[in-house]
Amino acid sequence: MKDIIQLHDRKFRVMIPAEEIDRAVTAVAERLNADYADKPTPLFLGILNGSFMFMSDLIKKIEFQNELSFVKLSSYEGTSSTGVVKNLIGLNSSIEGRHVIIVEDIVDTGESIEHMVRDLQARKPASIEVCTLFFKPASYSKNFPIRYRAMEIGNEFIVGYGLDYDQLGRSLKDVYVVTE
Ligand code: IMP
Ligand code: MG
């Protein structure tokens, strides 16, 4: 593991080593295993691109029968007064009556997850919960409760384990934080 790395114009240093991430993923998987044991085939829905590595490690620790799929949030400048409109793309089958677990890399302000939850709720699932690898409590400004948080951090900017800085850094197995 390199202690300091350069991505584009910024330097980053190691903040959370892979072993610590693994322990946090195990802990959140155990909570899911307890809460969903008696639910009929829950559906894990990963948000691309950031959640791919978390999903891959999390799902190996899940003990109940499950399905998994990935979706993307596309954003484009809409003509509505709200400005940026975000659409869910890639969800081709019905989720009506299903127990859905959204898998995210990081929930910051909650803007993205709010769009996601609103879109999914319209499709009448039995339940929706969010399982995020990282949560920034000081930044989160939405009402939807984020039930499963593997780790909480401050408002610092991090990369690695799926998270990127302008598309770089996703493949790192440790998490790095931007240096001042
Ligand atoms: P939100 O909509 O403000 O909750 O932001 C969520 C999205 O912003 C995440 O899915 C990430 O793509 C990105 N993001 C927020 N904080 C970070 C960070 O510290 N590192 C990398 N990406 C981040
Ligand atoms: Mg993301």
Image (spheres, rainbow, N blue to C red):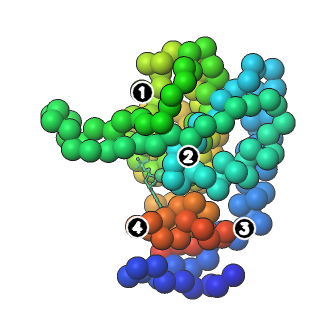
Distance CA(mark 2)–CA(mark 4): 18 Å
Instruction: Check contact, mark 3 vs mark 2: CB within 8 A.
Output: no
| Numbered circle sitting on residue 18 | 3
The quarter of the image holding the C terminus is bottom left
Q: Which residue is mark 1?
A: 119
Q: Is residue 35 above or below residue 49?
A: above
Residue 118, by quadrant, is top left
Q: Which residue is mark 4?
A: 166
| Mark nearer the viewer, 4 or 3 | 4
Q: Which residue is mark 2?
A: 104
Helix, strand or loop status at disc 4: loop
How many numbered circles does the render carry? 4
| Disc 4 crowd, CA 10 A, few/some/many (<14, 14-19, 20+) | few
Viewer can see residue 144: no
Distance CA(mark 1)–CA(mark 4): 26 Å
Distance CA(mark 3)–CA(mark 1): 33 Å
* Amino acid at dot 1: Asp
- Residue at 74% of width from left, 31% of height from top? 66
| Disc 1 crowd, CA 10 A, few/some/many (<14, 14-19, 20+) | some
> Extreme right residue here?
63
Instruction: Check contact, mark 4 vs mark 3: CB within 8 A.
Output: no
